[in-house]
Every structure is written in structure tokens, then in C-alpha cells.
Amino acid sequence: MNKLTFLKSDRSNIQLVLIIGLFLITISIFDVFLNSFFKINLISFLPSKISFIFPLVIGMMGFHLIRIEYSGNRYIDILNKNINTSTFNAFLTLLILFLILKAIPPSLSWMILDANISGDSKDACTGSGACWTYIKVWFRRFMYGMYPNEQHWRINTAFLLVIGLGTFGLFATEKMKKFLALYYVVIYPILAFLIIYYLISGGYFGLEWIETGAWGGLSLTFIVSFFCLIFCFPLGMLLALGRRSSLPAVRYISIGYIEFWRGVPLITVLFMSSVMFPMFLPEDFFMDKLVRVIIAITLFEGAYCAEVIRGGLQSLPRGQYDAAKSLGMGYWKMHIFVILPQALKLVIPGICNTFLALVKDTPLIFVVGLAELAGMLALAKTNPKWLGFAMEGYIFASIIFWIICYAMSKYSYNLEEKYKTER
Amino acid sequence: MSEAIIKIENMNKWFGDFQVLKDINLEVEKNKKIVVCGPSGSGKSTLIRCINRLEEHQKGSIVVDGTELNENTKNIEQIRAEVGMVFQQFNLFPHLSILDNCTLAPIWVRKMPKKQAQELAMHQLEKVQISDQAQKFPGQLSGGQQQRCAIARALCMEPKIMLFDEPTSALDPEMIKEVLDAMVNLAKGGMTMIVVTHEMGFAKEVADEVIFMDEGMIVEKAETKEFFANPKSDRTKLFLSQIL
């Protein structure tokens, strides 16, 4: 019986048991730490198999010992409640901890300690780690594509202008608030288009004309995502309303549209837009490849948006429609003032989902010869002077995409919070 | 005798194969208060929902304030603006404050200037005694307060007729009284009202006529005193004996 008392405290020797438990856990973590950071094996005298699982066993014993209700120590209670509720959870905790400890030194040395960033050619990369020189040298290409270096200020200015116009809503006075929806749905896209057309594309006001084929890199990612986002949302809204319309023609057209676009892969849509579509156009009619691609993605994502918004419309109780109608509101007034504000609020997470997918789908435009960020990477990694740095490039792109997407999802959480007035 | 503001002739309605309303004939004169009662499923709610065409009838005619209800949507929107309705589940707009709930329709349907609409709304909210809650959202109010707000919202359109669809059925017993009080006040002001309710006390107090419906038909229609004192049909007697 004595032995059992030692394995599980009967609260008489609680302090001792806690100390032994914590000591065992510390030993196990310390062992793995030394092993992974300094290549020292404290228990190398044991057979290799036992020494391999030794930290896990010791750690599990430690966790078992400190798993006591109301141990008297606040921190141990928190630990028990969150990561040490059962033997299995303790096991997972230790496993994850060990994996992280094991993963840190190699990734750290690859990404920072053994990495190179100086110099401007492949020869500068002498270390065994990452070659950030590659990113540094290609940075402008990754950001601006084949756009001429001395013209980059045009892209920067255009983006600043577009962002500046986008913040207009924050400064709008009470009187202008009425027109905000109109501004964002109609005026803003047109202004943004004009700015990008005249400033980035050029050809007017003494600015050199630069064809869209030369655009690229992250700035192209932004341009494509931006226009697709602002156009596919209203399109989706109309389609969602259309699918619920009582007019059969409108309803069937909407259903047909949505089911068609949801049924085809984006990559074929892009091919169609750039290869097939011009064949059906009259000879003298010219539409830029980039514009065609943006339209294609917008039409495609609009169908997804429509279904997300329809979900929101369907979740509203019928009473809301009844109440709006009973006050004499017509179809559009009812939807604009009563139904859509509530439905759109409900579908913020879903819409954010669709938008994130859209941003991450933009690399697909590479198939029609437009090289945005991921496309530029694909070009750069096949450059004979810079072979063998695909890893660095993809890590760089992942980080950038992650930042963009995380910012978008954070913003959507903020919106949700902001409009949470009831229920 | 004043003219009828609502005139229903041989009105029939089906939900699929099921006939909900059978040969309804009803005339409501201006400033009269009508209470409609009857067992659940008897078509009371459907009847008053037909009056502002939240439900469409299939046969017969409904004329409200001189306009026949038909496919013409513009007509219907005009009628609905003149006919206020209060629902069992309040149906306030949860994304708007109480004040905005009341001003929304006057501003956008009646084209009233915002200032004037707000004054009107505050006046109506004062009448139902919730003007101090004007800036709150519906979700922050009790059921009784929400229903009174719903009444004020309907009144802000300055309707000629008010329809009440079981306005107290979703309320706690304690809150029923405050809503009924608001309705009694409204009745004393001379509004034309059609009220579907099980509150027989309210019927006795304000109704000019009581209609008893069962299985989609108007079984009995009589002056209030007459209705409670000597109901004619056996079905009415049975109903009254159970409810009173």
C-alpha cells in the first residue's frame, strides 16, 4: 500500500509529491532541450531505445504526480485544468512540447543563423542555410513584376490613392453617410479603376504606356483581388436575391448562373477567358487580358458569394419580411433597409471565407501568363543564374499570403464585433 | 351609419389543398373595434393577414379603403401603408434602435423629413410609455416593451386601420396588461381596429362586435354584449364556456 500512496498522493505528503512531479517534468524537458540544442545526451549510458523514450516516460510520471485536484498552487491548478486532465492529454502535451523543441534549432539555423543575406549574386550564398540574398535581389520583381524599375513610383502612388479613397467612409459626416453605400458600390470602384488605368497603365499625361503583361508580383495580386472582391460582392448579392425571387425568369436565370459557375473549375474559366473568349469577339474589338481575367474571376466568385448570402437571407425569420411589408415597404426598400443589413451581418464569416479563397486563388492566373507573386516565384526559380532557391521563395510567398489573409480575417472579426448590436 | 372601410365578400383561401377560409363575408365600418376569437387553426390570423395581403386570397374580393386587393403591387403598398399591423412575435427590426424602428417607414415610405419623423416617433413612443427606451435596441427590451414599441411603430405610419394578430400571446402574464392598456388607449382614440385575441376581458371592454370563427368560417358575429350574454350557436357556447 505504501507504494500506491507514493504514486498518488493522499494529501498528507502533497508538497513532496508536487515537488517530485515538477522535478521529473523539468528533467524530461531539460533532457530534450539539451539533446536538441547542444546535441548532449544526458542518459547516453542507457541503451539507445530506452534513452529515446526516457524523457517521455519521466515526463508522464511527473504529470501523473502533479495531477491533484486543489493542489494549493494556482499555477499547477491551471496546468492541470488545461493540459493535464488525463494521461492521454499529458502525453499529447509532452509530445507537442518535444516536437517544438526538436524543430526549433534546425529551422532557426536554416532561416537565420546559417543564412545569407549580403551580396547580390548566387555566389554570396556560402552558408548551409537559406539564401535570403535571392529574395533581396528579386524583391522588386516579386513586388512589381516586369514593370520597369524607374516607374515603380506609379504603382505606389496609385495604391496610396486607392487606399486613401477607401478610408473616405471614416471621415464622412452624418449627412454624407446616406451615400456611403452608393459610394462604395459604384463610385469607388470606378475611381479606383480610373486611377489604376491612367496611373499604372499610363499612355496619357506623358506617362509611358506599360502593357498589362508586364505587370506582376504582389501588386498584381492586389489589383486582381481588389477588383474581384468589390465586384463579386454586389453581384453575389443580386444573384442571391434573384434566386429567392418570386419571378420565375429571374429565379431560373440566377439558379442556372450559380450552378454553372460553381460547377466549372476556375482554371478552365481562366483558360476560356484568355484563349477561347477572344475568338468569339469581332476582329477590331480588343479587351485586355487582365480585364478579361478579372471579369472571369468575378463571375466565378460571384456565384459562391451568392450562395453564402442566400444562407444569410434564409436564416432570417419570416416575421421580418411580414413586418417590413406591413409598413408599406416595397421589395427594394424592404431588402435594403431591413433584410440585407441583417442577413449580411450574419454572413460576415462566410463572406470572409470566400474572399480569402479568392485571394489565394489569384496565383492561378499564371496559367494565362500573368505572373503575380506566386507566378513571379515560378519564373524566378527557373532563372539559370538562380537555380535551387525554390524553398526560400515559397516560404517568402507563404509569409506574405499569410499576412494578407490574417489581416483580412482579423478585419472580419472586427466587423462582426462592430455590428453585434442584438441577439 | 358610416361606410364600410373594409369589405370582404365571399372570400376563400386555400393552403395547397387545404381550405383555410370558406366564404368569408365581413364589413367593418370606420372607427369600429372588432375582436376575432376562436380555437387555434380556425383561420383568424389568416383572415387578418389577408386584409393587408400578407396572404393572398384565391376567390372573392377584399376592398380596403376603397381599393380592391389584387395583383397590382403599387396598390398593395399603398394599402399596407394605411393598415398598421402588430404581430404575435413583435417582429421589431433587431439591427435598428427603437427610435429608428419607428422612423424607418415614415422616412422611406411616407417621405417624411427625418426631424419630423423623429418627433412623431417620440410622440407615439410617449403614448405607449417607452420614450425613455428610444435609443436602445429591441434585444435589450422586455417582451411587453417590445410589443408596445411595435404598436408605436405601426402608429407612426398614421394608419387608418390597425390589425392585431394575437398581440399578447407571446407575453408573460404580467406584461399582458401593459400592452392591453396601450391598445385600450388606442381604441378610445377612435382607431378602427381588428384584434385577434383570446383576451375576453379586452373584448368586453372595447369591442363593438365580436366574431367567432371555427374551421375557416365565421360561425357567429354579434354585438359584444349580445355575444357574451346569449351566444346563438352551440359551438360558440362551448368555446365561451371553456375560455371564460
Image (cartoon, coloured by chain):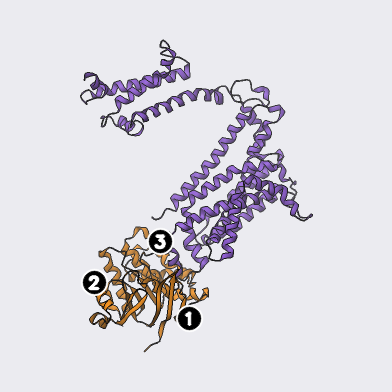
Chain colours: A purple, B orange
Q: What residue do we see at 52% from left, 45% from top?
A: A408
Which of B152 and B67 lies nearest the eye of the viewer?
B67
Q: Are marks 3 and 2 in contact (CB under 8 Å)?
A: no
Q: What residue do we see at 44% from left, 81% from top?
A: B65
The Cα atoms of the two marked residues, 1 and 2, are separated by 39 Å
Tell me the number on the disc at residue B97. Answer: 3
Residue A1 visible in the displayed image? yes
Tell me the number on the disc at residue B67. Answer: 1
Say which of marks 3 and 1 sits in front: 1
Name the spot of residue A391 as percent of width and height, x first. Answer: 60, 29
Labels 1 and 2: the sequence-earlier one: 1
Q: Amino acid at mark 3?
A: Ser
Q: Are marks 3 and 2 on the same chain?
A: yes
Per the image, label 3 sits on a secondary structure element best described as: loop
Which of B231 and B66 lies nearest the eye of the viewer?
B231
The Cα atoms of the two marked residues, 3 and 1, are separated by 34 Å
Tell me the number on the disc at residue B135. Answer: none
Name the spot of residue A159 as percent of width and height, x first. Answer: 62, 46
Name the spot of residue A103 as percent of width and height, x first. Answer: 49, 25
Which of A415 and A79 lies nearest the eye of the viewer?
A79
Alpha-carbon neighbours of circle 3 within 10 Å: few (<14), some, or many (≥20)?
many
Q: Tell me the quarter of the image containing the N terminus of chain B.
A: bottom left
Q: Amino acid at mark 1?
A: Thr
On the image, which quarter does residue B125 sit in?
Answer: bottom left
